[in-house]
Image (cartoon, grey):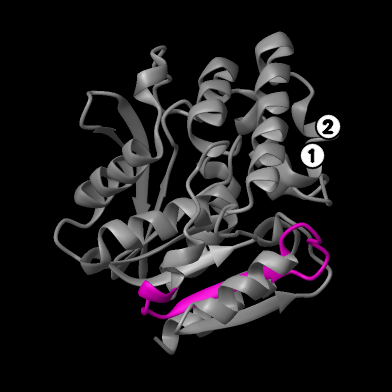
Amino acid sequence: MADVHASDGVRLYAEATGEGTPLVLSPGYCQTHENFRAQVGPLADAGYRVVLWDYRGHGQSEAPEAESAYSMEQVVDDLGRVLDWAAPGEPAVVGGLSFGGLASQHFALRHPERVKALLLVASGPGFKNPKAQAGWEAQVGRIAGRLERVGFEGYTSGRAAPNAIGLKPDLPAAQAAGRAIEAQSAMGVASFGRRVAGPAPSTLDRLAEIRIPTLVLVGENDAAYLPAGQVMSAKLPNARHVLIPDAAHCVNIEQTDAFNAAVIDFLRET
């Protein structure tokens, strides 16, 4: 593990396991790197250098106070800094869950020479429709407001649990992810939501530019993201669309073995 310093000096948590092609996994909004812990061993054993990290404001990364420290452009740059540390000069497999998938799309569009394949898990391209975008920002604003009022205490045992740790909270991976989520800075995550996750620009009109192999993976019970997965699969020129049975949003935790197998199968064929 390491502290990676962003372009503005913010300290970012990152870790890397294994040797081979770098593969960076970015979590969803409000999640931490621990949400992908169950992927590290299997993917490293399959021949990949697995990189986990925390966004600014999240997990073990620094949570700057200034609102100006939070933007999608800065997140993309932060991801680049993490890759510079973990695998300098090497093209990487880049992916993530939910917001992590959207951030990965922005990174691939900004730095196509640095990405050899994409993993878009329970994710989407953002919203073009103004009404839908306003609704999304309002939803993220409510989450941020709750965090500012009461913090993360009880967050992963309440209504947020399905999107934070999945529908099987007794699983060891879910419990570990929950502990890491509830230990992080509520103020930093709230700022990230209002400045980054909520107003995140859509990639919908630029998906055709992403010509690298892309895995679009969704749990079959993830009703909110099933349509987005279909849209991305139709618009991305080189996409594989996979549904994982008996899984919802946190598909990598709820169905770890099936998820890992689908990712490894995809990577071996790219």
Question: Count the marks: how many?
Answer: 2
State the residue position of label 2: 157
Disc 2 residue type? Ser
Point out residue 133 in the picture as x, y percentages from the top left corner: 64, 44
Amino acid type at mark 1: Ala
Q: How crowded is mark 2: few (under 14 residues within 10 Å), some or many (20 or more)?
A: few
The residue positioned 51% from the left and 57% from the top of the image is 101
Left or right of 170 on screen, residue 131: left
Bounds of the magenta span?
A: 208-225
Q: Residue at x 60, y 23 (%)?
A: 183
For numbered disc 1, what is the local secondary structure?
helix
Q: Quadrant of the C terminus?
A: bottom left
Between 151 and 128, which is closer to the camera in this rendering?
128
- Please give the residue where the numbered disc 1 appears in the rendered image: 161
| Relative to 242, residue 254 above or below | above
Magenta stretch containing residue 27, yes or no? no
Local SS, label 2: helix
Which image quadrant for residue 226?
bottom right
Does residue 1 appear anywhere in the picture?
no
Q: Most extreme residue toward the bottom, as rendered?
A: 269
Residue 223 inside the magenta-drawn segment: yes
Q: Distance between the residues labelled 1 and 2?
A: 6 Å
